[in-house]
Image (spheres, rainbow, N blue to C red):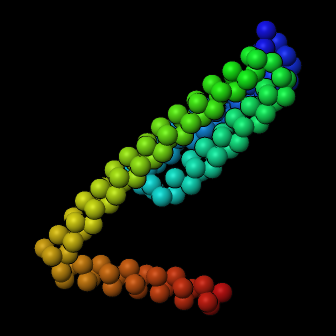
C-alpha cells in the first residue's frame, strides 16, 4: 500500500500538519476580520502559499516513488489544492467585502455624529491632538 512507504507517510503527515495550521490561521483571521481585515489577510495568504508549496513537495515525493498510485494521488492532491485555493480566495473576497461594508457603515455613522454635533467633534479632535502632543513632548524631554 502506498501509505506504508515511510517517505510518503512522512510527507502526508507533514502535509496534514501544514493543512491544519492553515485552517487554524484562517479561522483566526475570520474572527479578526471585523477589526483588522487587511492585517488578517496577509498571514492567511502566507499560509495558503505554504500549504501549496507543501502540496507540491508532497506531489514531488509521490512522483519520485514512480508508482501508478502516486501519480493518481498527485493528481488528486493538485485538484484538491486547486479547489482549496479557489475556496479560500472566494472566502477572502467575501470577508473583505463584508469588512469594507462594515467600514462604510462606521464611517457613515461617524460622519452623522459630526453633522449632529460639530462642536463636540472639534473638541474631541482638539483633546486628541493635545494628548498626542503631550506624549510626544514627554518623549523628547527624556
Which residue is the extreme one toward the top? Answer: 1
Tell me which residue sits at (69%, 21%) in the image: 72
Tell me which residue sits at (52%, 33%) in the image: 83
In the picture, measured across the screen, residue 140 lies left or right of residue 65, that is left
Tell me which residue sits at (45%, 55%) in the image: 37
Tell me which residue sits at (63%, 25%) in the image: 76
| Quarter where residue 99 is shown | bottom left
The location of residue 43, given as percent across then percent down, is 59, 51
The location of residue 97, given as percent across then percent down, is 35, 52
Give above or below for 67 relative to 123. above
The location of residue 24, given as percent across then percent down, is 57, 36
Where the N terminus falls, by quadrant?
top right
Where the C terminus falls, by quadrant?
bottom right
Q: Nearer the viewer, residue 130 or 49?
A: 49
| Quarter where residue 130 is shown | bottom left
State whether residue 31 appears in this view: no
| Quarter where residue 54 is shown | top right
Amino acid at each position: 500500500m502506498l501509505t506504508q512507504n515511510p517517505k510518503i507517510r512522512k510527507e502526508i503527515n507533514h502535509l496534514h500538519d501544514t493543512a491544519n495550521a492553515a485552517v487554524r490561521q484562517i479561522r483566526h483571521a475570520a474572527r479578526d476580520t471585523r477589526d483588522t481585515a487587511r492585517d488578517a489577510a496577509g498571514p492567511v495568504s502566507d499560509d495558503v502559499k505554504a500549504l501549496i508549496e507543501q502540496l507540491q513537495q508532497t506531489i514531488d515525493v509521490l512522483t519520485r516513488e514512480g508508482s501508478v498510485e502516486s501519480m493518481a494521488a498527485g493528481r488528486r492532491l493538485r485538484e484538491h489544492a486547486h479547489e482549496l485555493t479557489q475556496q479560500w480566495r472566494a472566502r477572502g473576497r467575501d470577508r473583505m467585502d463584508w469588512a469594507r461594508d462594515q467600514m462604510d457603515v462606521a464611517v457613515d455613522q461617524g460622519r452623522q455624529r459630526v453633522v449632529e454635533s460639530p462642536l463636540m467633534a472639534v473638541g474631541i479632535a482638539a483633546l486628541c491632538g493635545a494628548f498626542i502632543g503631550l506624549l510626544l513632548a514627554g518623549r523628547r524631554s527624556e
